[in-house]
Amino acid sequence: MTSIALLIEDLIEVDPFAEESMMSTTTGDTEFIIYRITKTAGVCGGEACIRGTRIAVWMLLESKDRGCTDEQFLDNYPHISREDLEAAWQYALQNEDELRQQIQNNRDA
């Protein structure tokens, strides 16, 4: 079994309700992102969120587009870490089209 498969197996044991999604990457950071960014049915519409929160990656990206800094995110969300933000930014780089569509969907709602 690959290390990614083992990691996912461990994550499901910790959070059996999470539907982990495999995030494609060419940067070698797949395990880091999978651990920190999850998609869970019934939570925020199944959109990518920081693990254990309802903080959607698209919401962070939209706020960053409007000028919010990492320090402001960390001050406003003290329960997330710098590593969580790094995983969110890496996920955003790899899945920008998906996140831009989610931003647009929210604006249209």
Image: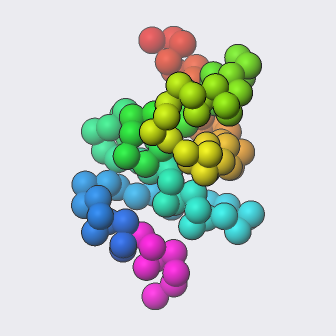
Q: Tally the marks.
A: 0
Q: Main secondary structure of the magenta part?
A: helix
Which residue shows up at 71% across the image and 27% down it? 69
Which residue shows up at 64% across the image and 25% down it? 72
Could you say where residue 84 lies in the image, as x and y percent from the top left?
56, 47
Which quarter of the picture shows residue 59? top right
Give left or right: position of 44 versus 91.
left
Could you say where residue 3 lies in the image, as x and y percent from the top left?
52, 81
Could you say where residue 18 lies in the image, as x and y percent from the top left?
32, 54
Which residue shows up at 43% across the image and 48% down it? 51
Residue 75 vs residue 62, the one in the foreground: 75
Residue 4 colored in magenta in the image: yes
What stretch of residues is rendered in magenta?
Answer: 1-8
Give left or right: position of 19 versus 36.
left
Which residue shows up at 25% across the image and 54% down it? 17
Could you say where residue 57 lies in the image, as x and y percent from the top left?
55, 36
Residue 6 vs residue 77, the one in the foreground: 77
